[in-house]
Amino acid sequence: MLVVTASVMAVITFSSTTPMTAPLDDTDRQLLSLLQANAREGTATLARRLGLARTTVVARIARLERSGVVAGYGVRLGARLDAGTVRAWCSISVLPKTAPAVLRALQAMAEVEEVSAVSGPFDYLVFLRCASHEQLDALLDRVGQLDGVHQTQTSIVLSRKIDRRSVGA
C-alpha cells in the first residue's frame, strides 16, 4: 500500500470524447497551458498573465469546461512519493472478446494508474506504480493470471528523462 506524504499540485484533465463547437484560439491555448502548470492558480493571476479581465478568464474556463475540453481537475503526485516507488510499463495482449472483463479487473487494481489501447503486437499499455519490487512481482502475477490475458511484457522504469506532467516541469 502506498502512503501519500508528498506535496501535491492540482492538475487539469482534458477530455477527448466531447468535441468543442468552436476551435481553440491562441488565448485558450495559453490559458490551458497555465492551468496545466497549476490548475489552482487564481483567476486574477491568470488574467494578469494573459492580459485579460478576470471575468473574461472565468468565462473562458467555464466555456472550456462546458465544451468538454477541460474534463476535470485532479492531483499530481510530488517527487517525494515518486522517488519511493517502483514504476513499470506492462504491455498486455488479450484474447478476443475478453477486453471488457480484463479492463474491469485492471480498473479494480489500485496500482494501475493508466491503461492505453495501443497498436502493434499488444492491445494495451498499462502504467503500474508499486511500493516495492516484491509488490510489483505479485501484481504482475495477478495481471498475468487474469482470465483473458494472453501475454504480457513488462519494462521497469529506471528513471524519467523528460516528464512534462511533473510538478515544476
Image: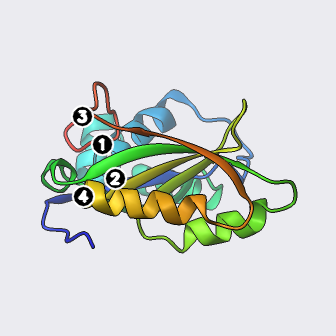
Determine the residue located farthest toward the right in the rendered image: 97
Q: Quarter of the image holding residue 67?
A: bottom right
User: Is residue 4 positioned above or below 95 on the image?
Assistant: below
Q: Residue at x 57, y 31 (%)?
A: 25
- Precedes in sequence: disc 2 or disc 4: 2
Identify the residue under disc 1: 37
Distance of mark 2 from mark 3, alpha carbons? 26 Å
Secondary structure at numbered mark 3: loop
Q: Tell whether label 3 touches label 1 (CB within 8 Å).
A: no
- Left or right: 23 with respect to 82? right
Secondary structure at numbered mark 2: helix
User: Is residue 3 positioned above or below 20 on the image?
Assistant: below
- Left or right: 32 with respect to 14? left
Residue 100: x, y in percent?
A: 76, 65
Secondary structure at numbered mark 4: loop
Distance of mark 2 from mark 4, alpha carbons? 46 Å
